[in-house]
């Protein structure tokens, strides 16, 4: 890969990383604010029922975005103990098995996540209290899986020693 092409990839990854970090930060702040509203409401004896449902949905988004971001530097959990005691050839093969298995699983998440979102849209499914369309929550699955695939590729390019 030549230097110019490498710089283009670095720019794309940098923008993607900043955007996903920003979204994760916004989600964290939203979760904090809703939980504070929930706690304050319980202290004064009139808790709002929407806060529990909103907390659950924000938490789902936070977890899935975190999963996608975790692949950026190969920080997601994986078994490395046995791989570390193997010969060098097995270690190199293990790296590719990890990459292929990870991307394969994330593609599975994209395909079935999109299918879930399509089903939620077709059934006009809404949440019980907030009455928001459930596809807004369900779309976190294919988004995080896509982010995970991109970040796995990024970790293969820039963090070869971690995989």
Image (tube, rainbow, N blue to C red):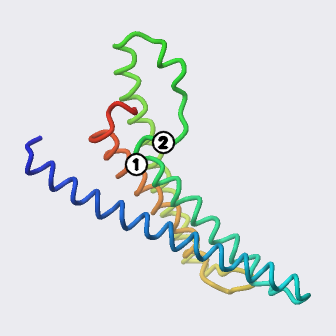
Q: Nearer the viewer, residue 135 or 51?
A: 51
Q: Nearer the viewer, residue 159 or 130?
A: 159
Residue at the right extreme, as displayed? 45
Residue at the top extreme, as displayed? 87
Image quadrant where residue 49 sits: bottom right
Give yes or no for contact between labels 1 and 2 (Cβ–Cβ under 8 Å).
yes
Q: Is residue 10 left or right of 88 when viewed as pictured? A: left
Q: Nearer the viewer, residue 98 or 35?
A: 35
**Which label belongs to residue 144?**
none
Q: Is residue 160 left or right of 104 when viewed as pictured? A: left
Crowding near pointer 1: few (<14 within 10 Å), some, many (20+)? many
Crowding near pointer 2: few (<14 within 10 Å), some, many (20+)? some
Q: Residue 126: horizontal and vertical position, in percent? A: 66, 81
Instruction: Label 1, secondary structure: give it.
Output: loop
Residue 140's place in the image compared with 88, above or below, is: below
**Which label belongs to residue 72?**
1
Q: Residue 13: horizontal and vertical position, in percent? A: 28, 56
For the point 82% across and 86% down, the residue is: 41
Q: Is residue 148 left or right of 59 when viewed as pictured? A: left
Instruction: Label 2, secondary structure: give it.
Output: loop
For the point 48% across and 13% down, the residue is: 85
Residue 6's place in the image compared with 63, above or below, is: above
Disc 2: which residue: 75
Measured Cα–Cα span from mark 1 to mark 2: 7 Å
């Amino acid at each position: 890969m030549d230097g110019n092409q490498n710089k283009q990839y670095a720019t794309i990854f940098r923008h993607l990383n900043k955007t996903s970090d920003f979204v994760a930060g916004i989600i964290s702040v939203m979760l904090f604010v809703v939980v504070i509203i929930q706690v304050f409401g319980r202290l004064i004896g009139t808790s709002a029922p929407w806060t529990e449902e909103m907390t659950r949905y924000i938490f789902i988004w936070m977890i899935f975005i975190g999963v996608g971001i975790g692949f950026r530097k190969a920080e997601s959990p994986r078994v490395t103990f046995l791989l570390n005691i193997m010969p060098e050839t097995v270690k190199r093969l293990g790296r590719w098995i990890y990459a292929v298995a990870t991307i394969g699983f994330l593609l599975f998440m994209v395909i079935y996540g999109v299918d879930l979102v399509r089903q939620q849209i077709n059934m006009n499914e809404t949440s019980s209290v907030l009455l928001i369309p459930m596809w807004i929550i369900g779309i976190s699955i294919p988004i995080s899986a896509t982010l995970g695939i991109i970040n796995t590729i990024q970790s293969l390019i820039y963090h070869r020693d971690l995989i």
